[in-house]
């Protein structure tokens, strides 16, 4: 059972990246999925979360209007399209899944997640 993130890397300010998180060993159909990030010296924070069937989403204020979360349950994959990237978006990005939770609660990180990916680094810099 694992979650594997991909799509990270170095991008200039104003650029775009699309992160992917692929689940293996289980189906994500019944899980809410979220993206979280941890910048150097800071606590991990919720970035964006999506419900099991994709009808509800939540975004951190800092990424609203710039990031878009989506999922393809047939591919067991969730995406995070990141546009207009800023240096302050630099962080290790993690995906995680949880059952029986609202997207708001999931992104608040008040509850434990069922599984975490290992994370992928996104660096926004000139």
Image (tube, rainbow, N blue to C red):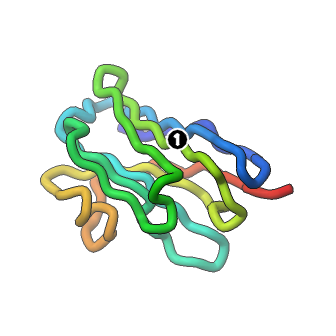
Label 1 CA crowd tier, 10 Å (few <14, some 14–19, many 20+): some
For the question of whether residue 115 can be seen, the reply is no
Above or below, 14 against 28 in this view is: below
Q: Nearer the viewer, residue 74 or 18?
A: 18
- Residue 5 x/y as whole percent: 53, 41
Residue beneath disc 1: 81
- Residue 35 x/y as whole percent: 43, 53
Q: Quadrant of the C terminus?
A: bottom right
For the question of whether residue 14 can be seen, the reply is yes
Q: Quadrant of the N terminus?
A: top left
- Residue 34 x/y as whole percent: 37, 51
Q: Residue furthest top?
A: 74
Q: Measuring 51% from the left and 76% from the top, which residue is drawn there?
A: 43
- Residue 40 x/y as whole percent: 66, 72
User: Which image quadrant for residue 72?
Assistant: top left
Q: Is residue 82 left or right of residue 103?
A: right
Above or below, 109 against 74 in this view is: below
Q: Residue furthest left?
A: 100
Above or below, 114 against 1 in this view is: below
Q: Measuring 25% from the left and 52% from the top, which residue is drawn there?
A: 98
Q: Residue furthest front?
A: 65
Q: Measuring 60% from the left and 58% from the top, which residue is drawn there?
A: 92
Secondary-structure class at tag 1:
strand
Q: Is residue 81 left or right of residue 105?
A: right
């Amino acid at each position: 059972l694992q979650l594997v993130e991909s799509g990270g890397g170095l991008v200039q300010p104003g650029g775009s990246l699309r992160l992917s998180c692929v689940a293996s060993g289980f189906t994500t159909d019944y899980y809410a999925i979220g993206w979280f990030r941890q910048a150097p010296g800071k606590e991990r924070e919720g970035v964006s979360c999506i419900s099991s069937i994709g009808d509800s989403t939540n975004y951190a204020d800092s990424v609203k209007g710039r990031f878009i979360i989506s999922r393809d349950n047939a591919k067991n994959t969730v995406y995070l399209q990141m546009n207009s990237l800023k240096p302050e978006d630099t962080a290790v990005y993690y995906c995680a899944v949880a059952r029986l939770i609202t997207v708001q609660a999931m992104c608040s990180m008040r509850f434990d997640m069922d599984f975490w990916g290992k994370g992928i680094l996104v660096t926004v810099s000139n």
